[in-house]
C-alpha cells in the first residue's frame, strides 16, 4: 500500500495529466471546428463567385444579342458592366480556391470565359461594320453557344466539387462537435472520480491527523506525568541527601574525633558520591525551572578568572582518578555582569566532561576572549572526540553519546542540557567543535553586559596563564 504522501503525489499527477489531456483534446477539437467553419465559409464564397462569373457571361451574351438585333447601343450596357467585372471576379475566384481539383479546372474556365468574351466582341464589331445579317450569320455558326456550354460545364464541375467539400467539412465539424461532447463527459466523469479520491484522501488524512493528535496528547500526558514524578522524586531526594551530607562532612572534618585512614577514605567517597548525587538532583530541578521559565537569574558583577579557578578545582574534586592538567588563558581583571553560581556550574559541567574523557597524558585548555560584543569561553580537550551527527543530540535532555572506547556514555545526559538552557537564559549560545580522534572544544558566548550594559575592565588586562 502506498504511503499517504506518495499517494497524494500520485493522485495529483493523475489529475494534472487528465487536465492536460482534456485541455489538449478540447484545443484540438476547437481548432478543427474553427478550421472547418473557415473552410465552409470559403467554399460558400467560392460557389457564390462561380455563380457570379456565370451570370456575367450570361450578361455578355444577352447584351451581344440585343445589340445585334436592334443596333441600339443601350443594349450593350450589361455587356460593358460584365466586361469590366468578370476579370476581377476570376482573380477573386483564384484567391478563394484552394482545392487541387478546382485549381485544375479554374484555368480552363478562365480560357473559356476569355474566348466567349472575344467571340461576343467579334459579333458586335461585325454588326457595326457589316450590318445585322453578317452578325447573325456569325452567331448562327454556334461558336458562342459552344463556349457558353463549356463555361456552364466547367462551372457546374467546380460547384459540384464545392458541394462535396461542404459535405466533407460539415461532416468533420459534426465529428468534432461529437468528440467535444464525448470529451466533456469523459472530463466530467474523471473530475467526479478525482473529487471522490480527494474527498477520500481528505477523510483519511483527517483520521490520521486525529490519531496523531491523540498520540501526541498521550505522549504529552506521559511526559507531563514523568516530569511531575521526576520533580516530586527529586524534591523528596534533596532533603534527605542534605541531611546525610551534613553529618558526613562533619565526620570528614573529624569534628567528632580522629578517624583512621580507611575511615577517612570511606567517608570521603561517601561525601563525594553524595555531592554528585545532590548536584544531579539540583541540576534536574534547575533544568525544570529553566524550561518553565521560573528560574530567576541573580546577576552580579564578578571576576571571570576567579570563577574559572573555582570551577577547575571543583571539577577536579568531583573526579576520583588522576586527571589531565588544565591550562587557562584568561584576561586578568575581566569582570562581567551575570549569575555567578550558574556560570560557575556551566564551567564545572564542561570541565568535568573534559576531565572525564581526556586521558591523564592529555591536556585541557580553557580560553576566554571576546568577539562581536560577547564573552567567549572555550574548553578544549584532547579526548577521543564526538561524531558530527551527535553534535545536536548531546545538548538534549538525557541525550547521551556512547564512547568508542569502553562503551561508557559521553555525558550524563543532564549537564550539557543545563549548560544550554543556562547560557540561553543569559541571551547567549553554546556549541561544540570536534573531530573523532582529535578532541573536542565546547564553547559558549554570552553578551558582554554589566549593570550599565557595558563590559567592566580593571586597570590592567594582561593574559593570565596558569595550570592546575
Image (cartoon, rainbow, N blue to C red):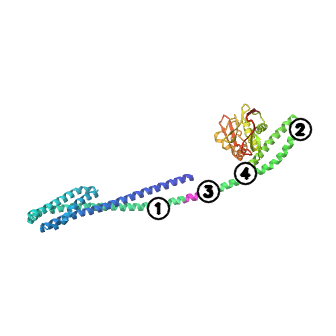
Q: Nearer the viewer, mark 2 or mark 4?
A: 4
Quadrant assignment, res 97: bottom left
Q: Nearer the viewer, mark 4 or mark 3?
A: 4
Q: 369 or 257, which is in the foreground?
A: 369
| Residue 293 position in % (x across, y down) | 73, 51
Residue 358 seen by the camera: no
Q: Which quadrant: the C terminus?
A: top right
Mark 1 packing: few (<14 Cα in 10 Å), some, or many (20+)? few
Question: Label 2's element?
Answer: loop
Q: Nearer the viewer, mark 4 or mark 1?
A: 4
Magenta-colored segment: predominant secondary structure = helix
Mark 2 packing: few (<14 Cα in 10 Å), some, or many (20+)? few
Which mark, by number, is residue 293? Answer: 4
* For marks 4 and 3 on the same chain, the one whose residue lies earlier in the sequence: 3
Question: Label 1's element?
Answer: helix
* For marks 2 and 4 on the same chain, the one whose residue lies earlier in the sequence: 2
Judge whether 88 appears above or below 279 on screen: below
Q: Which residue is mark 2?
A: 254
Q: Which residue is mark 3?
A: 209
Q: 415 or 195, which is in the foreground?
A: 415
| Residue 379 position in % (x across, y down) | 71, 37
Q: Which residue is mark 1?
A: 188
Q: CA distance from mark 2 to mark 3?
A: 65 Å
Mark 4 packing: few (<14 Cα in 10 Å), some, or many (20+)? few
Amino acid at each position: 500500500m502506498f504511503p499517504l504522501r506518495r499517494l497524494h503525489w500520485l493522485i495529483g499527477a493523475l489529475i494534472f495529466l487528465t487536465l492536460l489531456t482534456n485541455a489538449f483534446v478540447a484545443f484540438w477539437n476547437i481548432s478543427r471546428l474553427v478550421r472547418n467553419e473557415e473552410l465552409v465559409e470559403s467554399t460558400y464564397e467560392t460557389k457564390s463567385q462561380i455563380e457570379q462569373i456565370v451570370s456575367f457571361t450570361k450578361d455578355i451574351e444577352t447584351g451581344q444579342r440585343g445589340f445585334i438585333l436592334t443596333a441600339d447601343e443601350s443594349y450593350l450596357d450589361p455587356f460593358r458592366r460584365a466586361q469590366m467585372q468578370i476579370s476581377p471576379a476570376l482573380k477573386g475566384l483564384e484567391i478563394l480556391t484552394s482545392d487541387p481539383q478546382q485549381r485544375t479546372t479554374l484555368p480552363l474556365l478562365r480560357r473559356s470565359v476569355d474566348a466567349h468574351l472575344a467571340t461576343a466582341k467579334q459579333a458586335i464589331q461585325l454588326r457595326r461594320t457589316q450590318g445585322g445579317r453578317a452578325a447573325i450569320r456569325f452567331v448562327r455558326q454556334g461558336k458562342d453557344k459552344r463556349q457558353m456550354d463549356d463555361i456552364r460545364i466547367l462551372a457546374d464541375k467546380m460547384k459540384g466539387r464545392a458541394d462535396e467539400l461542404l459535405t466533407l467539412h460539415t461532416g468533420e465539424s459534426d465529428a468534432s462537435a461529437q468528440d467535444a461532447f464525448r470529451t466533456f463527459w469523459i472530463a466530467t466523469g474523471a473530475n467526479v472520480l478525482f473529487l471522490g479520491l480527494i474527498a477520500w484522501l481528505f477523510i483519511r488524512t483527517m483520521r490520521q491527523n486525529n490519531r496523531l493528535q491523540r498520540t501526541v496528547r498521550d505522549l504529552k500526558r506521559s511526559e507531563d506525568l514523568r516530569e511531575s514524578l521526576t520533580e516530586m522524586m527529586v524534591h523528596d531526594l534533596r532533603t534527605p541527601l542534605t541531611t546525610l551530607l551534613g553529618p558526613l562532612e562533619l565526620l570528614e572534618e573529624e569534628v567528632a574525633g580522629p578517624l583512621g585512614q580507611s575511615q577517612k577514605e570511606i567517608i570521603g567517597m561517601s561525601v563525594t558520591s553524595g555531592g554528585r548525587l545532590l548536584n544531579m538532583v539540583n541540576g534536574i530541578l534547575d533544568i525544570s525551572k529553566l524550561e518553565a521559565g521560573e528560574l530567576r537569574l541573580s546577576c552580579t558583577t564578578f571576576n571571570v578568572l576567579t570563577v574559572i579557578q573555582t570551577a577547575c578545582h571543583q571539577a577536579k574534586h568531583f573526579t576520583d582518578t588522576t586527571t589531565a592538567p588544565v591550562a587557562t588563558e584568561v584576561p586578568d581583571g575581566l569582570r562581567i555582569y551575570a549569575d555567578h553560581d550558574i556560570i560557575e556550574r556551566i564551567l564545572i559541567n564542561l570541565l568535568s566532561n573534559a576531565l572525564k574523557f581526556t586521558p591523564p597524558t592529555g591536556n585541557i585548555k580553557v580560553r576566554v576572549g571576546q568577539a562581536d560584543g560577547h564573552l567567549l569561553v572555550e574548553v578544549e580537550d584532547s579526548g577521543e572526540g564526538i561524531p558530527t551527527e551527535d553534535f545536536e543530540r548531546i545538548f538534549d535532555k538525557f541525550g547521551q553519546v556512547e564512547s568508542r572506547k569502553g562503551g561508557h556514555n559521553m555525558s550524563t545526559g543532564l549537564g550539557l542540557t543545563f549548560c544550554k538552557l543556562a547560557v540561553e537564559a543569559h541571551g547567549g549560545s553554546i556549541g561544540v567543535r570536534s573531530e573523532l580522534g582529535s578532541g573536542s572544544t565546547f564553547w559558549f558566548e554570552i553578551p558582554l553586559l554589566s549593570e550599565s550594559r557595558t563590559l567592566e575592565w580593571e586597570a590592567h588586562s594582561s593574559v593570565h596563564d596558569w595550570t592546575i
